[in-house]
Image (cartoon, rainbow, N blue to C red):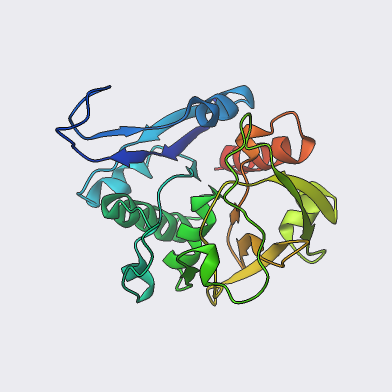
Amino acid sequence: MTKPIIGITCSMVYQDEKRVSPTTLSFDYLKRVYFEAIENFGAAPVLLPNLTDLEFVEEWLKIVKGILVSGGEDVHPSFYGEEIVSDKVEVSQERDYLEIEFVKKAKDKEIPVLGICRGPQVINVAFGGSLYQDLSFRKEFTLDHTNTGIPKYSNRHEVVISEKSQLFKLLGKEKIWVNTYHHQIIKDTAPDLVATAWSQEDQVIEGIEHKSSKIMGVQWHPEMMLEEESSQRLFKWLIDEAGKL
């Protein structure tokens, strides 16, 4: 049986003459845990570099059967009608343009999409939603979701899942424990999306999905929790849906 090909988006580092290692040149990269997860669950991962010619998106979508929007830098606020007002915002607009185009065209072609951390933020912005540029901008009580505890972003909190969501049908649980490593969060959910999961303690949106397409995103990092059945099911969902095309 042919393995479905899953395209995975990459993070981007700009050229810096002051940098010594690994190079002064700009480069794209991806943490191995992403493509190892795709490989382990029976699909063939392909890395999608941040090319500036968006016409390549059409060509890639002739090959890949699923898209994994990986974690990484922030979405530029201009994509949701704002200027940068937080000194914590780090952006790569080339990546923003590419991933937003991927999400929109994948929806049109009924190609499944799974977003992780930055991923659901990209999905939300692609369909007209907005973000808080930093956790501190939210007026309500908000946990510190920026924890960088290693290994596996060790700080965990509980997430409540909507029983009406596809995420609930997939995971079969109303509550799960997740890791956390992000400083931005979803503000206004896009009209074509629905929130599917919230942080138990502060009601920060932790999951979204498209109302009519095979597109979903989670704010946590399941690739760092592959021993958890809930994490395994997310990757299996993407690969199973891709295998139907």
The reply to whether residue 1 is in sight is no
Query: Residue 229 sits in which quadrant?
Result: top right
Q: How many marks?
A: 0
Q: Residue at x 52, y 56 (%)?
A: 183
| On-image quarter of the C terminus | top right
22 sits to left or right of 141: left
Which sits in the foreground, 140 or 203? 140
| Quarter of the rendering occupied by the N terminus | top right
In the image, residue 43 lies at what x, y percent? Answer: 56, 28
Residue sitting at x 36%, y 60%: 87
Q: Is residue 204 visible?
A: yes
Q: Is residue 217 above or below residue 139?
A: above
Residue 74: image location, x then y, percent: 41, 55
Front position in the image: 184 or 165: 184
Query: x, y percentage for residue 8?
Result: 44, 38
Compared to 140, does 156 lie above or below? Answer: above
Left or right: where does residue 159 sit relative to residue 36?
right
Q: Nearer the viewer, residue 206 or 56?
A: 206
Residue 138 picture quarter: bottom right
**Which residue lies at the image location 14% right of the left edge and 33% below the top edge?**
17
Residue 66 x %, y %: 50, 42
Q: Given the current orientation, which residue lies at the most extreme left position? A: 17
Q: Residue at x 46, y 69 (%)?
A: 127
